[in-house]
Image (cartoon, rainbow, N blue to C red):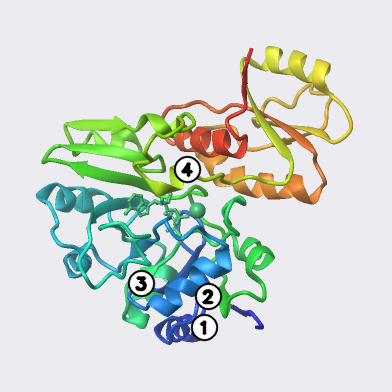
Amino acid sequence: METILFRDTAEDISAAAELIKNGEVVGIPTETVYGLGADACNEKAVKAVFAAKGRPADNPLIVHIADFSQASLYTASVPALAYKLAERFCPGPLTMVLPKNEKIPMITSGGLDTVGIRVPSHPVMHSIIERSGCPIAAPSANISGLPSPTCAEHVMEDMNGRIAAVLDGGKSEFGVESTVISLDGDESVRILRPGAVTKEMLLEVCRNVIIDPAILRELKDGERAVSPGMKYKHYSPKADVVMVEGELDDFKNFISQNNGDGVYSLIFDGDEAEFPYRYFTYGADSSEQAHWLFQRLRELDEIGAEKVYVRAPLKDGIGLAVYNRLIRAAGFEVIRI
Ligand code: TXA
Ligand code: MG
């Protein structure tokens, strides 16, 4: 199949929406990362999404809607807290896991009786949902296990020939996927995947925010994943990634002892003065690091890096999301110095 590259024009947006309406899979821009969009209620279309990604069937897809008022169309109930959260964070990078109703097929929810609902803020994505007239199921538009795509070229790299089209809506603003939460009673939420809606921000609306412990460590043998995505290898480039936690001087010292052919460092902007080793930088603060991380991981592959030592990011604010992606890219290999 030939994959069409659409531009950010009214005509192309309508054409992309039309394809989705007709059961095709299209790479679409969002403010977090690019998604692989299909009609969430069309089993055949959703099946094609799983096939294009090579995604395990038990890992559910997020359903994207144009306005949170439509959540009740696809869920069995919407608690008051969900509306409160939506008022503050929708549209935006937040996904709420809610009990699903029969309109969402089991294949979309990976066999679960819940569905992740998100209202994206990207204007192009918003128009595509409105014009297609369907809720859009969309996982990140990468081949399963690879870094998520933050621009149309990344989607083309992974999906050319596998899907009907990609719409180029520019570079994704945040660069990491949405914050996924489940709701627990009237006042409490649990973060299943950290993102740009941070714990501190959620605490403005909820009394209690639990960070699921599996966000920062590997699942233990036999431990049940509260979110199926936690079980799988993620965000991994071909290079062997290792995260190194420590001050800059310790990091430099570590590299001096572990340098060799094919070894690269991924450091902060500002670390590079007197850094006499091969390196890429991924931003000066957590927001920049979120924005650049996946692109840098792809670039390190292009250049043929074999081993990448990453200077570990801070773990507060959106930094927790960056840390969470990196620890998975590193297969939980962290060196503390
Ligand atoms: O920002 C995003 O969320 C992007 C854009 C395209 O919207 N989408 C995305 O989808 O990251 P995906 O499929 O790559 O990641 C969704 C994550 C997975 O880890 C999945 O297990 C979890 O959300 N998830 C989805 N539905 C869930 C549910 N009903 N219960 C628990 N976890 C769920
Ligand atoms: Mg993904």
Q: Amino acid at mark 4?
A: Lys
* Marked residue nearer the N-terminal end (1 or 4): 1
Q: Secondary structure at mark 3?
A: loop
* Circle 3 or circle 1, nearest the eye: 3
Does any atom of ligand 1 lie closer than 8 Å to the CB of label 2?
no
Say if mark 2 contacts mark 1, CB within 8 Å: yes
Q: Amino acid at mark 2?
A: Asp
Other-residue count near label 3 (Cα within 10 Å), few / some / many at <14 / 14–19 / ≥20? many
Percent x, y for residue 52? 57, 69
**What residue is shown with label 2?**
8
Other-residue count near label 4 (Cα within 10 Å), few / some / many at <14 / 14–19 / ≥20? some
Percent x, y for residue 250? 69, 12
Q: Nearer the viewer, residue 141 or 231?
A: 231
Give how far apart the Cα atoms at labels 3 and 1 are: 21 Å
Q: Amino acid at mark 3?
A: Ala
Quadrant of the image containing the C terminus? top right
Q: Which mark is residue 12?
A: 1
Say if mark 1 contacts mark 4, CB within 8 Å: no
Q: Which mark is residue 72?
A: none
Q: Amino acid at mark 1?
A: Asp
Name the residue at 52% across, 32% down.
Answer: 323
**What residue is shown with label 4?**
231
**What residue is shown with label 3?**
40
Name the residue at 27% across, 52% down.
Answer: 97
Is 55 placed above or below 306 here? below
